[in-house]
């Protein structure tokens, strides 16, 4: 991180310099550290410039000129989501910065950093990556400016964009540049994007599949009358002399099935799909929705084709997504020599993100859930990449032996979803040809393996390690999968729940759930029955903490009212909630922007998705989730009156909110267990302090907030006294 460290190592120059918007923490949960260690293992010298002052190019010269390239990342979170709330208000804290100090990175960090790095050394290749670049690789709706913005490539003027998990691409790229290859000639790496002249193709044998239009009704042609008499036309018949001249016998060759498949695959692999141009989608919602649908259908690395989109006089070219890492490759990445601590230059400064993940272990990546409000598929993909059991256990032992402050509790064994570890398609060929957007919606695919036995084995061996007192599961749980394995639910509930377990129904109403691609609330009820049963058998008082989304596209006022009534019926009072935040390239964001549903074929007259866009309606939807808050009652009284549901205003238990002058005690019976829940819609939210239910234990609980590792999780406190800080939590739900 400094010239002094370079001198100590005897380096006169770095091969690669990674510029990051986060504080530098050398831990595999932080992207810049993971990429740095991967390159180091390949023999490259890597420097880190953390949170430079972007107002001039001088800080980007701090480590000198890199020999191969600058690697630019906004950090583990998208910079706009990191800085702004769902209401576009500036957050007061940045959990990825020393002492939580805000404003240490610019808006749209990747673009700004890339421009400054270019200014610092104009002849050094600029490579951009991270979730911010990944989710902005094509034209995308930007919630914060309320318009469709160009791909980040032309704005940043980068030479290459790496999207998704880029270990393979970054290693190949570094070696090829080291061998003297020009960055402009590296055009064949999977998981990369770059700018090319309009109409450019990698070779003459490539073809273009034009997807720049949606289907429209065509001219109706009358069927010919099969009984009509028409004069015979002999002009096309060959004469006898011509027939003799053409009498050249050509043998007919019958191709085998394997040959036909190989020929089709070769043609498929050398086809690029042309998306509607930026100049079209920025002004045409229907074409934007069509583009989103085509883009998502080309997301499976087993069958995805290259994509190209015109931006003015040039094209943005995207190669197919990166292939998932195999288990030994994942082990290799996570077994590298991380210091597992913040850089010493931060001294005793508190970095909230580090405090949250220091005692947690990431066991997998990816998610096949396909929730429309989540961008995990666009970034990490839907194929689960898992570590081996020995690798996971080694990291637990490493935490026990070398991480300061460890008291015996592993705060999480998880990932984007806690119970997708080693779950995969039963047939590799089916997986590679599949174009489903979700393996679990509208129902769990018959080809998806749902055996949780390997995960159960990890849990049992982890808690059997000497010195390990408790192993908690803090990542979000996919409960519709969990109920397929009662043994797993029993194992989880008996040994790995610290009083509270978070799950995410997201909503109760079918109208909204179909737009989310989430299971019906019946799956939650089934899981709750199992949870309560096994908690009782274990002699433990434990609670489910459900998460819900306010103002999701497709949600009506009536849907939110019904959700509020469900919460009241089930004695949930949500402490803190947030409304839906449209994140770049998510399918729900497309619904929000275009009012079209990209889950189905998009045409001019296809399904219209109504969504809450005005500030007042979004506030009403949010208020329904916190019906017990007196500050929300005036707004809710007005809303209920306009909906013709004034019958829900009054001072008895049958009412939702009290009449003026009443109190929540008038309408809400004493909570049998004093349960509390947490509502959320913005999966990227910064940490918030929560309350433990009355009567529950004070075991730390963490709430999922981010799609990127590590998520910034929340600490729950009892009302009587503060609980220990929640540490080591992994990302719960994207």
Image (cartoon, grey):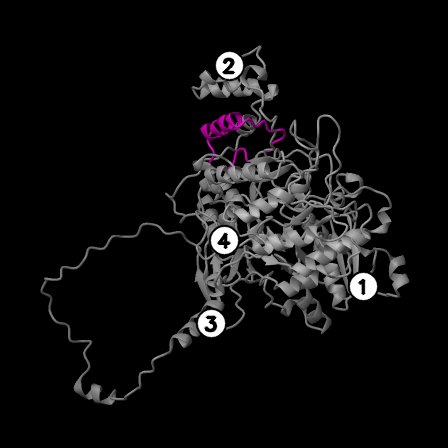
> Between 4 and 502, which is closer to the camera in this rendering?
502
Residue 275 relative to residue 665: left or right: left
Label drawn at residue 14? 1
Taking the image as drawn, is residue 594 in sight? Answer: no
Q: CA distance from mark 4 to mark 1?
A: 38 Å
Q: Can you identify the residue that label 2 sits on?
A: 652
Does 707 appear in magenta? no
Q: Can you identify the residue that label 4 sits on?
A: 296
Whether tag 4 and tag 1 are in contact, CB under 8 A, the answer is no
The residue under the point 68% across, 33% down is 697
Q: Can you identify the residue that label 3 sits on?
A: 266
Residue 358 relative to residue 236: left or right: right
When the figure is inspected, residue 609 is found, relative to residue 267, above or below; the finding is above
Q: Which residues are magenta?
A: 549-578
Does 567 appear in magenta? yes
Between discs 4 and 1, the one toward the N terminus: 1
């Amino acid at each position: 991180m400094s010239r002094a460290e370079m001198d100590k190592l005897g380096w006169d120059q770095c091969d690669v310099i990674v510029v990051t918007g986060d504080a530098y923490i050398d831990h595999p949960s932080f992207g810049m550290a993971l990429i740095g260690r991967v390159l180091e293992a390949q023999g490259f010298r890597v420097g880190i410039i953390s949170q430079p002052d972007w107002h001039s190019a001088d800080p980007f010269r701090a480590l000198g000129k890199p020999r191969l390239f600058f690697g630019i990342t906004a950090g583990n979170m998208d910079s706009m989501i990191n800085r702004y709330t769902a209401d576009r208000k500036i957050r007061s804290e940045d959990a990825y910065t020393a002492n939580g100090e805000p404003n240490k990175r610019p808006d749209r960090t990747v673009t700004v950093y890339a421009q400054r790095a270019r200014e610092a050394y104009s002849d050094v290749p600029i490579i951009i990556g991270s979730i911010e670049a990944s989710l902005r690789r094509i034209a995308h709706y930007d919630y914060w400016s309320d318009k469709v913005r160009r791909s980040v490539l032309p704005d940043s003027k980068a030479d290459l964009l790496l999207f998704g998990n880029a270990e393979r691409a970054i290693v190949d790229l570094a070696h090829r540049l080291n061998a003297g290859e020009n960055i402009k000639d590296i055009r064949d790496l999977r998981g990369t994007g770059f700018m090319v002249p309009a109409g450019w193709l990698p070779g003459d044998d490539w073809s273009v599949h034009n997807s720049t239009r949606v289907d429209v009704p065509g001219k109706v042609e009358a069927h010919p009358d099969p009984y009509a008499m028409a004069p015979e036309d002999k002009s096309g018949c060959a004469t006898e002399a011509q027939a003799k001249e053409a009498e050249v016998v050509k043998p007919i060759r019958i191709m085998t099935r394997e040959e036909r498949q190989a020929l089709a695959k070769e043609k498929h692999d050398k086809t690029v799909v042309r998306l509607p141009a930026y100049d079209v989608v920025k002004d045409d919602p229907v074409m934007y929705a069509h583009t989103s649908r085509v883009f998502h259908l080309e997301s499976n690395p087993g069958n995805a084709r290259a994509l190209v989109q015109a931006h003015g006089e040039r094209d943005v070219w995207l190669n197919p997504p990166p292939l998932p890492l195999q288990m030994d490759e994942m082990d290799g990445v996570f077994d590298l020599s991380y210091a597992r601590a913040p850089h010493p230059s931060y001294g005793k400064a508190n970095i909230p993100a580090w405090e949250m993940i220091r005692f947690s272990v990431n066991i997998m990546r990816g998610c096949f859930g396909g929730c429309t409000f989540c961008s995990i598929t666009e970034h990490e993909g839907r194929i689960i990449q898992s570590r081996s059991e020995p690798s996971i256990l080694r990291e637990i032992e490493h935490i026990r032996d070398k991480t300061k402050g460890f008291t015996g509790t592993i705060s999480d064994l998880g990932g984007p979803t806690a119970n997708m570890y080693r779950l995969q398609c039963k047939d590799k060929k089916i997986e590679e040809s599949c174009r489903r957007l979700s393996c679990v919606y509208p129902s769990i695919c018959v080809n998806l393996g749902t055996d949780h036995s390997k995960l159960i084995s990890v849990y049992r061996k982890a808690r059997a390690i000497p010195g390990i007192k408790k192993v908690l599961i803090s990542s979000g749980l996919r409960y519709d999968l969990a109920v397929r394995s009662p043994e797993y639910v029993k194992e989880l509930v008996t040994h790995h729940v610290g009083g509270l377990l978070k799950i995410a129904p997201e909503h109760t109403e079918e109208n909204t759930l179909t737009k989310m691609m989430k299971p019906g609330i019946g799956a939650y009820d089934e899981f709750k029955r199992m949870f309560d049963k096994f908690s009782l058998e274990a002699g433990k008082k434990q609670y489910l903490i459900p998460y819900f989304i306010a103002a999701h596209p497709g949600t009506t006022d009536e849907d939110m009212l019904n959700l509020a009534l469900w919460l009241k019926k089930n004695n949930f009072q949500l402490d803190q909630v947030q409304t839906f935040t449209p994140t770049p390239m998510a399918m729900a964001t497309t619904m929000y922007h275009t009012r079209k549903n990209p889950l189905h074929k998009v045409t001019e007259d296809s399904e219209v998705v109504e969504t809450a866009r005005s500030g007042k309606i979004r506030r009403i939807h949010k208020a329904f989730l916190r019906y017990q808050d007196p500050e929300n009652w005036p707004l809710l009284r007005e809303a209920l009156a306009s909906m013709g549901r004034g019958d829900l205003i009054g001072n008895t238990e049958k009412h939702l909110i009290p009449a003026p002058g009443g109190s929540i005690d008038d309408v809400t019976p004493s909570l049998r267990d004093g349960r509390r829940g947490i509502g959320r819609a913005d999966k990227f939210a910064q940490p918030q302090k929560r309350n433990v239910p009355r009567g529950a234990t004070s075991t730390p609980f963490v709430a999922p907030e981010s799609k990127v590792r590590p998520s910034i999780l929340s600490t729950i406190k009892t009302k009587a006294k503060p609980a220990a800080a929640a540490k080591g939590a992994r990302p719960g739900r994207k």
